[in-house]
Amino acid sequence: MSARNVTDADFEAEVLKSDKPIMVDFWAEWCGPCKAVSPILDRIAEENADKIDIVKLNVDDNPETAMKYGITSIPAMYVFSDGEVKKRIIGAKPKPALESDLAEFLA
């Protein structure tokens, strides 16, 4: 299962109330590095569907959530657990680096 989209309207229900860790990929259509990291996140989501969910939030279409979490640089990937940010990853990275950053959630 590849990463699905979330919005300002469903962020609380989809992310903050998730019963397992969930990574939010804050991105925008015009962002080249965001497009580069997207298929990597889809692969991580597929390979680890039982451990972590990955969702995408377009910052241009959903400015309220992006502002609430202080997103000033994209791609920004925040891992939430129990309704709180547990990890922040800023910038596009290759798959092994992202998996290393997520190791505590993928174990």
Image (cartoon, grey):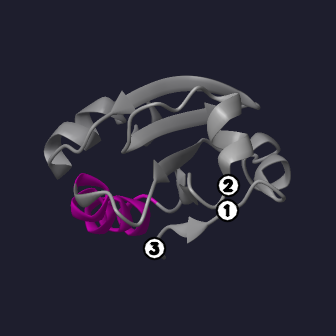
Residue 35 counted in the magenta span: yes
What residue do we see at 60% from left, 68% from top?
Answer: 5
- Residue position marked by numbered label 1 in the rendering: 6
What's drawn in magenta, residue-wise? Answer: 33-48
Q: Secondary structure at mark 2?
A: loop
Q: Secondary structure at mark 1?
A: loop
What residue do we see at 76% from left, 51% from top?
Answer: 11
Label 2 to label 3: alpha-carbon separation: 20 Å
Amino acid residing under circle 2: Asn
The location of residue 60, given as percent across then percent down, is 56, 56
- Residue position marked by numbered label 2 in the rendering: 62
Label disc, if present, on residue 2 of the rendered structure: 3
Residue 38 counted in the magenta span: yes
Q: Is residue 6 left or right of residue 46?
A: right
Amino acid residing under circle 1: Val
Q: Are marks 1 and 2 in contact (CB under 8 Å)?
A: yes
The location of residue 67, given as percent across then percent down, is 66, 33
Q: Secondary structure at mark 3?
A: loop
Mark 2 or 3: the one toward you: 2
Amino acid residing under circle 3: Ser
Q: Is residue 14 left or right of residue 59?
A: right
In the image, residue 102 above or below residue 63:
above
Q: Main secondary structure of the magenta part?
A: helix
Q: Are marks 2 and 3 in contact (CB under 8 Å)?
A: no
Label 3 to label 1: alpha-carbon separation: 13 Å
**Which circle's residue, 1 or 2, is located before the other in the chain?**
1
